[in-house]
Image (tube, rainbow, N blue to C red):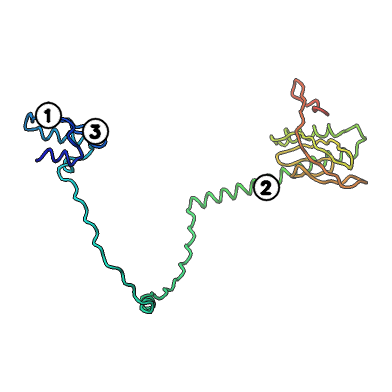
Amino acid sequence: MDLEAVIKNAGFDLARQRKHKIYRDAFGRTLVTASTPSDRRFHQQVLAQLCRITGTRKHELLAPKKPKRSARKRGPEVSAPPAVEAWIAQTTEDPPVPVTPSPAPAPLMPTRSERKRLKRLEKYEAQRRAKRARQLERLREEVGTLHRALMENEPGHFGATHAAMVLYQCAKQRLGFGDTEIMVADLKLERDVLPLLIVRVSNWFLDFYWNEVRNTAKWSAELPGRSVVEVEVYGAVEIIRDAGGEIVGLGGF
């Protein structure tokens, strides 16, 4: 093995020589070897050091890659006449293949457990609708009772504030609606805006002035002898209670 040739093929040139030989490559990497071999493993040690410096394997250093042969030059390509090309295109073109549409996949049948679950959901939804209809009917009865009390009693004897507190307690305690609050609304007349008290139960608005249970916070109503007015609910009212928890008043009313 010609060690000097291997080092030179790796790109290293001898920079100087005294007791040791100093080789350097174009990247500034340095290879140091003894000037005279010390033992029979000298060549293997130098090769191992050269592999670590260059990051290549030993067999790549001993058998460097041969340069690839250049591609053989070919003569200029001769194209066929246009008539010949048209005839080739006509004869080689494949006929259209009829495509049969694939049938739609059959719907997957639900499993037994899925069918049971669907039945339970349908039963629950039916029960929920029936319960909501009963609740709405009971609320309409209470709203109608308060509306008649307001219309039949003398002004000041049974006012809107007292009616709102009674309806709130009825929905909260007797009917069991947890999401209940007394809210304030604006009654928009032609030139004036008057406050109204409305009791909200879940997503229903109990309008005991016109004897209606509404499902929106804004509606139109008609006053006796007047044109249509707009009512819009916009905020909750503070409920004032005594030490025993009884309602004694409303903040601002």
Of labels 1 and 2, the one closer to you: 1
Image-based side of 94 in relation to 225, left or right: left
Residue 16 is situated, as x and y percent measured from the top left of the image, at 17, 30
Q: Secondary structure at mark 2?
A: helix
Residue 172 lies, with reference to residue 85, above or below; the image says: above
Residue 235 to residue 136: above or below: above
Name the residue type under label 1: Ala
Q: What residue sits right under mark 2 in the picture?
A: 130
Q: Position of residue 26 (x, y in %)?
A: 25, 37
Q: Quadrant of the C terminus?
A: top right
C-alpha distance separating marks 3 and 2: 89 Å
- Examine the rendering and report whether any part of residue 169 can be seen: no
Q: Residue at x 52, y 50 (%)?
A: 116
* Element class at badge 3: loop
Nearer-the-camera pick, 207 or 11: 11
Mark 3 lies on residue: 29
> Identity of the amino acid at label 3?
Arg
User: Considering depth in this image, is 100 or 251 the residue closer to the camera?
Assistant: 100
Residue 162 at x, y = what percent?
83, 31
Q: Which quadrant is home to the N terminus?
A: top left
Question: Which residue occupies 78% across, 39% down?
Answer: 233
Residue at 81% x, 42% y: name it: 231
Give the residue pinned by disc 1.
Answer: 34
Disc 1: CA contacts within 10 A as few (<14), some (14-19) or many (>=20): some
Residues under numbered marks 1 and 2 in contact, where contact means CB atoms less than 8 Å apart: no
